[in-house]
Image (cartoon, grey):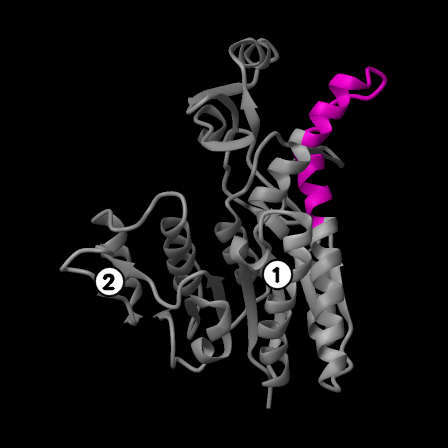
Amino acid sequence: MNKRRVVVGLGRVAFGSTLPQQKEAVQRAARAIADLVEARYQVVVTHSNGLQIGMIHAAMNEFSKNNQEFTAAPVAVCGALSQGYIGYDLQNALRTELLDRGIYKPVCTIITQVRVDPFDKAFNHPTKEIGRILTKEEADAEVEKGNYVTEVDGGYRRIVAAPQPIDIYEIDSIRTLADADQVVIACGGGGIPVMQQGTRLRGASAIIEKDLGAARLAQMLDADDLLFLTGTEQMTVKPGTSQEQKLGKLTTVKAEELIEEGYFDAISTLPKMQAAVEFVSSGKDRRAIITSLDKALAGLKEKAGTIIS
């Protein structure tokens, strides 16, 4: 009997907001993933990096200001760094958790590049905030360099584009390892956005929406399930009102209706629903599940969460 292949998308709840918090938080994520492995699912993991890439970007830029011989790190490089150190913590935590359960299964992290279209309209309408709050003078300097900024409480922040993921360059390596029944961590933060120029790949000043990156990964791996693990057990509409409604099983048609009616938050819940619909619509008998870390296995058994099919 073939194992079901599931792509697991870990949200920011799995990592905390500091390095010590991340070390502790990944233990919980590792337990959830190990439950799936123990239940004989074939698992590929992707993850959020929003807080981490911002921290790296701020640190590298501050370092370059105080050390003139060093240059500021491009956004794509910051994304690669975040994939490396998040993957390091998660890979080790999961390896330990599996061994503690008597399961020997290799776990590996792949630095993953994702092709984006240089003519994607997102490059003219950047939305993703990155880095620390800037003064007016610092913001003006960013604009002089051709970057975008937006006004926020307390000052300004740099913003970058969120283009659509088109292709995953390391997909053959990811698939080979998954076919060998290894646990693979890939496409962290949606993947490192790159543009193809002949035989070269050039990093883009952008951040791919992680949920859409997870959906693209799941499609290209021909996964059976796309499992988003968040801070809540189930999606809701009109939360905190007398008309609050928890969402259990949904068709893609119903999910699209809710999206069109504007029920989901543009920053957190909307991308997950859009990614879920995109994945389920891309092939036969595919499911997307949105639930909490602690309900990962229950979600795949359709005993918890929001299930789109």
Quadrant of image for the N terminus: bottom right
Which circle, 2 or 1, is nearer the viewer?
1
Q: Could you tell me the amino acid type at mark 1?
A: Ala
Q: Residues within 10 Å of mark 2 (few under 14, many from 20)?
A: few
Q: Residue at x 59, y 83 (%)?
A: 3
Image coordinates of residue 273 in percent, x first then y, are: 37, 56
Image coordinates of residue 114 in percent, x first then y, are: 63, 45
Helix, strand or loop at label 1? It is helix
Q: Is residue 72 covered in magenta? A: yes
Q: In the displayed image of the protein, which residue is found farthest to the left? A: 242
Is residue 11 among the parts visible in the rendering?
Answer: no
Q: Is residue 268 covered in magenta? A: no
Please provide the residue range marked out in magenta. Answer: 59-83
Q: Residue 172 is drawn in which quadrant? A: bottom right
Q: Residue at x 26, y 66 (%)?
A: 246
Location of mark 2 (residue): 254
Q: Is residue 195 left or right of residue 72?
A: left
Q: Could you tell me the amino acid type at mark 2?
A: Lys
Q: Residue at x 26, y 62 (%)?
A: 253
Front residue of 262 and 91: 91
Q: Marks 2 and 1, Cα distance to the nearest angstrom?
A: 34 Å
The answer to which of marks 2 and 1 sits earlier in the sequence is 1
Q: Is residue 53 above or below residue 285?
A: above
Location of mark 1 (residue): 25
Is residue 22 among the parts visible in the rendering?
Answer: yes
Front residue of 51 and 216: 51
Q: Is residue 275 left or right of residue 16?
A: left
Image coordinates of residue 156 in percent, x first then y, are: 49, 20
